[in-house]
Amino acid sequence: MQRTLKWAAAVWLLAAGAVWAQDAERGVIVTGEGSVTLAPDTATITLGVTERAPEASEAMTAVTGAVARIVAELDSLGIAARDRQTSRFYLRPVFGDQEPLRESGPAVVAYEAGNSVTVQVRDLTQVGAVLDGVLSVGANDFQGIAFELRDDTAALAEARKRAVADAMLRAETLADAANLNLGPVVRISEASRGPRPAQMEMAQMRSDMGAAIESGEVTVRSDVTMVFEILPTQ
């Protein structure tokens, strides 16, 4: 039964490809692009704590304490529990690289523990205060900040409309230049790229976080491919 289904799927794909090829032979194929650029309304910050100590328990204790202080600071700033999440947690040995190798392998000279937290800030005026606050209580691993849209539905719909309009204009231009009678659309496909968040890395930050933050803009894009029928010349 499974082999039959696979065979049927393969036949369907071949048939679909043949239909597309037939459309291409007698039609005009164009691509269209559409985009919408908006101001972001949300910031997603990824930060964490990394500590090294001679004993694994010491490294873990240091990280746990720092994360507890970060959570308390976020609470004091009004960041809801639903807007923060642990995204990475690890404990690993640190091996010495200066000592000669032993039969059992390199010696463990310390342990490193780390914990990353992803924080969503819904009020962009708070971004500077959040960064200042968490850094002041022990965060030492800032991994970046992305400015995004909470809901890109309307923006994506508009980008799609612009992409289709762009494709239709291209098709009309090509048909006019080639003296062809452009017919209806016989096939359309889309490759939406969604919102592209504005990113900021640690290298872009200054000691005064509040003065360094610029949210920039978010771009939502859509690409479409359309096939138009060519009508017989009158």
Image (spheres, grey):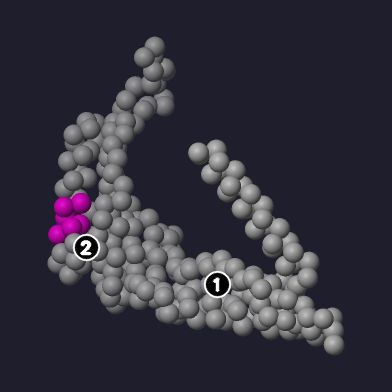
Question: In the picture shown, does residue 184 fall above or below 114?
Answer: below
Residue 176 highlighted magenta (yes or no): no
SS category of the residue bearing label 2: helix
Q: For the residues carrying marks 1 and 2, which lies nearer the camera in this image?
A: 1
Question: In the picture shown, does residue 54 fall above or below 214?
Answer: above
Please indicate, yes or no, whether residue 224 appears anywhere in the rendered image: yes
Instruction: Name the main secondary structure of what is drawn in magenta.
Output: helix
Residue hosting label 2: 82
Residue 72 highlighted magenta (yes or no): yes
Which residue type does callout 2 highlight?
Arg
Specify start and end residues of the magenta stretch as a single range. Answer: 67-73
Neighbours of disc 2 within 10 Å: few (<14), some (14-19), many (20+): few
Neighbours of disc 1 within 10 Å: few (<14), some (14-19), many (20+): many
Which mark is drawn over residue 152?
A: none
Residue hosting label 1: 222
Question: In the picture shown, does residue 58 fall above or below 148?
Answer: above
Q: Where does residue 6 sit, x and y in percent of width and height?
A: 56, 43
Please indicate, yes or no, whether residue 207 appears anywhere in the rendered image: no
Which residue appears at 71% of the width and 58% of the height? Answer: 18
What's the distance in space between the residues labelled 1 and 2, CA to CA?
31 Å
Which residue appears at 25% of the width and 67% of the height? Answer: 130
Name the quadrant containing residue 165: bottom right
Which residue appears at 58% of the width and 48% of the height? Answer: 9
Q: Nearer the viewer, residue 20 or 77?
A: 20
Which residue appears at 53% of the width and 72% of the height? Answer: 221
Which residue type does callout 1 highlight?
Ser
Q: Where does residue 233 sit, x and y in percent of width and height?
A: 85, 84
Q: Where does residue 186 sit, x and y in percent of width and height?
A: 66, 73
